[in-house]
Image: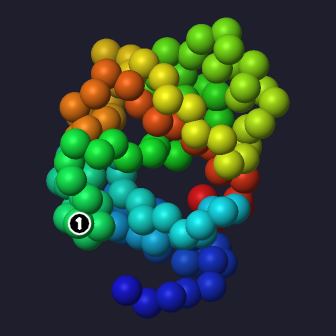
Amino acid sequence: MPIVKADEEAIRDAAEHLRAGRLVAFPTETVYGLGADATNGQAVAAIFAAKGRPRFNPLIVHVLDVGHAGQHARLTTLARRLIDAFWPGPLTLVLDKRPDSSLSDLVTGGLATLAVRAPDHPVA
């Protein structure tokens, strides 16, 4: 996988890779991540395979904002207060997954909860 500067063209290319079910590596404000379309079960399975990660070990889903998080997780009053205080940023919340979420069930490792985070990085 080539390392490229995160300019507009590279971000468009990465988005195309994600839409095609491929993996991309990207920076966040804390570490580099390996990402895929979390609604695509085959793409999510590829993350587990690439990392050698057991499928019972859940992944963190990056979201754009509180609205995006609320599409996939039940946002409690406490969760909303934490989001207001710390997002975007390096805070991951583990919340109940909404039954109508479009995310692949592989993301949660078979659990009823979902880990969500809104990174504070222009590329992530």
Residue 2: percent from left, percent from top: 43, 90
Residue 119: percent from left, percent from top: 65, 50
- SS class, disc 1: loop
- Quadrant into which the C terminus falls: bottom right
Classify residue 106 by image quadrant: top left
Residue, x 68% and y 14% (percent of image)?
A: 78
Residue, x 62% and y 85% (percent of image)?
A: 5
- Quadrant into which the N terminus falls: bottom left
Is there any visible trace of residue 73 in the rendered image?
A: yes
Classify residue 111 by image quadrant: top left
Is there any visible trace of residue 104 in the rendered image?
A: no
Q: Residue furthest right?
A: 85
Per the image, the residue denoted by label 1 is: 52
State left or right for residue 57 relative to residue 9: left
State left or right for residue 8 relative to residue 86: left
Q: What residue type is labelled 1?
A: Gly
